[in-house]
Amino acid sequence: MKKLAYGLKSLIILLLIPITIFSQKEVKDLSLMPMPENIQLNDGKFLLDKDFTIVINKNEKKLFDAAYRSIKLITDRSGLFLNNQFPFVQPDAKGKGVVINISEDVELKLGVDETYELVVNEKQIKIDAPNSFGAMHALSTLAQLLDSDEAGYYFPGVTIKDKPRFVWRGLMIDISRHFEPIEVMKRNIDAMAAVKMNVLHWHLTDDHGFRIESKSFPKLHELGSDGFFYTHEQIKDVVNYAYERGIRVVPEFDLPGHATAWVVGYPELASAPGPYVIERMWGIFNPTIDPTNEEVYKFLETFFIEMTELFPDKYWHLGGDENNGKQWNANPKIQEFMKANNLKDNHALQNYFNVRLDKILSKLNKTMVGWYTDEMPDISKDYIVQAWKGRTTLYETAKKGYRSLISHGFYIDLVQSTEYHYNNDPIPPDSILTDEVKERILGGEATMWAEFVGPETIDSRIWPRTAAIAERLWSSGSINNLNNMFNRLDQVSLQLENYGVTHIKNQDMMLRRIANSYDIETLKNFVNAVKPLYTYSRDRPHIAKSYYPMTRIVDIALPDPRSARLFNTSVDELLSNEKINSDCYEKVKSHLETWKENHKNLLPLIKARPILAEVEQLSEDLSKVSLIGLEALELIKENKKADALWITASAEILKTAAVPKGEAELAILSSINKLLAKVN
C-alpha cells in the first residue's frame, strides 16, 4: 500500500479490515474478475506500440502457446500491427513488453501452486510465478486490464499479488441429456481459463446417452448414444486443450443409477431384464446396475482401464446419486444377497457397490469423486464428496473427514440470479468450522445440467453468471460488494466474447429467426424484461422430451437479463432516497414507457408467428404492469398516496401477471410491486 497519513479513527478501521480488502475507490475502474487477493495502483501506464513483445525465461510449450494467444487477443482488441507476432524465449528474459519468469515446469494436479505476481509500470510488464499455471493466470489478468484513451491502448500501472482461495474451481457440463459438439466444449474451456477456473467436470453418461466411444464394449456408444458421442481422439484433444490452459478434466461415469444408456447395449449389467431404450424424458428412472453380479465388476474394471488412457487426472467422478432402488427391491436374487451379506437396506448395498468400485479405481491410481449420498461409512477418506443437497451436507462430510466440494447454490441450470450465486460463500465469514474442517473444503463447481440447453443456448446459461461464481471460489469472501461486482461483470461479459462464447450474440440471432426479419427491436424489448421459469417448475403445459426444439422465447430469454436488472436497481435506488433522484427517476420512467407501448407494437409479429402465441399474454402483462408502474411513479414524484380502489385493481393485475406464460415470467414484477407499495 502507498504510505498515507491516517487519523487514529481511520487506522483503527484499517486494522479491522482483512488484509485482502483494498480501496474500492482505487480499483473501481478495473474490470477484473476474479478480483485479485492484493492489488495496488501505481503511477503511470504502459502504452502499447508496434514493438510490444512477450519474453519467457523458459522454453515451456504450454506457456509459449498461452503467451501467443495473449498477443493475438491484445492485437485483435487493439488493431495494432506488431513487428513480432510470436513470443521470445530468453533465459535472461528482457524486452519491451511482458517479461515472464517461472521457476519450473510442474504437473497439473490438485493443489498445484497457482500464485503469481504482476507488475505494470511505464517501461515494462513483469510476471513472476512458480510455474506456467500461475503465469497463465497472470496473462488472463493482464488481458482484463487492457484499456484505451486518446493516447492509445495501454495497461494501467499496477502491482498485483494473487492466489486462489480454493484449489478446486470447477464447471460441470452435462453432455448426456443434450450432446454438445467439441467446439462448444473448447470455447467454454477458454472462457473458464479467462476467469481462472481450473476443473472441467465432464458428465459423459446418464439415462439419455452414453457419449464416449468404448473400444472394449462398443455397444455402449453404438446403441446408447443415437450416434452422438466423442471418439477417443476427440476426448484426447479436449483433455489436452484444457491442460494447456491449466484446466484438469474430471470425467463422470454415472453409476449405479442414471444407468439406462449403459444397459441399452449390455442389459445383463442391469438389476432387471431388458430390453432397454434411451430415455427421452426428464426425471429419475429405474434402470440400475446390479451390484451383486460379479461380471459387473469385471466389465467396469476393463472399461475403466480403457478410459485411463484418455483421462490422466487422478480424480474420477462416478456419480452415485438418485438411485431409487426399485429394481433392487423387485429382484429376489438381490434381496437374498443382501440378507446373506447382512446388508440391511439399499443404502448399505450401494455402499457395498461403492467400496468395490473404490478398490478398482485405487488399483488404477484413481481417486473416487461422487455426489453426496448417505452411503459412505466404509469408503476411503480419499473419497471426495460433492455436496448438492445443501451447505449442511458439505459441512457434515468435511467433519467426518472427507474432502468436500459444494455445488448447492451453484446450479446454474436453474436460471437463478447472479446475486444468489455470488452470495453463496462455501465458508461464510461467520462460519464456526474449525480450521481442520475448513481445509477439507476444496472449493466448488457450477453445474450445467442439460435438460433445457443445446449448442445455441448453453453459453447463455453458463455465462456471465459463472464468472461471478469463479470470483466467489477464487477471491476472498470479503470481496462481496454487489454493485461493484456487477459493474465489473458487465465488462468481463463483453470480454468473454473474445474467447468465442456466444452468450450475448446468439440471442439476437435466435430472435431474427423467430421474426424472420432484421428488425427485432420490439421483440428484444419484450425479451429483455422476462426470464425463464425456474427449471424445476418447467414441463408445463407440455411434458418436455429430449428431442423437442429449444428455440422458443423461454430458451432465448436470459436467466438474469441485464436490462431488467438495471431497471430493478434504479427502482431500489429511487425508493431508498427521501428526495427524488432525477437521474433514477428518468431511467425508471424511460424503461416503463418503452415496455408500456411495446405490446401493441409487438402484436402484429405475435399474430404472424405462431411460436410467439404462448407468450402473447405475457407481453400484454408487461404493458399493463408498466402502466401501473408509471402511474405509481408520478404519485411518488408528487409525494401523493394512491386511491384505494386503484390500489386494489392494480394489485389484482399484478397477481395475474405473476402467473408464468410459455414457461417464462416477468423479471421486473418485484420492482413494480415496490412502486405500488410506496404509494399505498
Image (tube, rainbow, N blue to C red):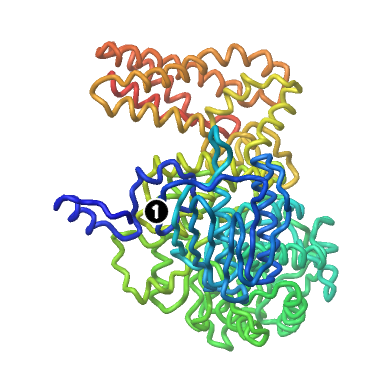
Asked if residue 453 can be seen in this view, the reply is: no
Q: Determine whether 418 is above or below 406 in the image.
A: above
Q: Residue 247: name its quadrant.
A: bottom right
Q: Is residue 654 above or below residue 191?
A: above
Quadrant where the C terminus sits is: top left
Q: Residue at x 70, y 32 (%)?
A: 510
330 sits to left or right of 29:
right
* Picture quadrant where residue 367 is located: bottom right
Specify the amino acid type for callout 1: Gln
Q: Is residue 243 visible?
A: yes
- Position of 198 with respect to 474 (left or right) is right
Q: Residues within 10 Å of mark 1 (few under 14, many from 20)?
A: some
Please provide percent x and percent y for residue 618: 55, 24
Residue on which the image places disc 1: 40
Towards the viewer: 339 or 593? 593
Give x and y (percent) for residue 232. 81, 68
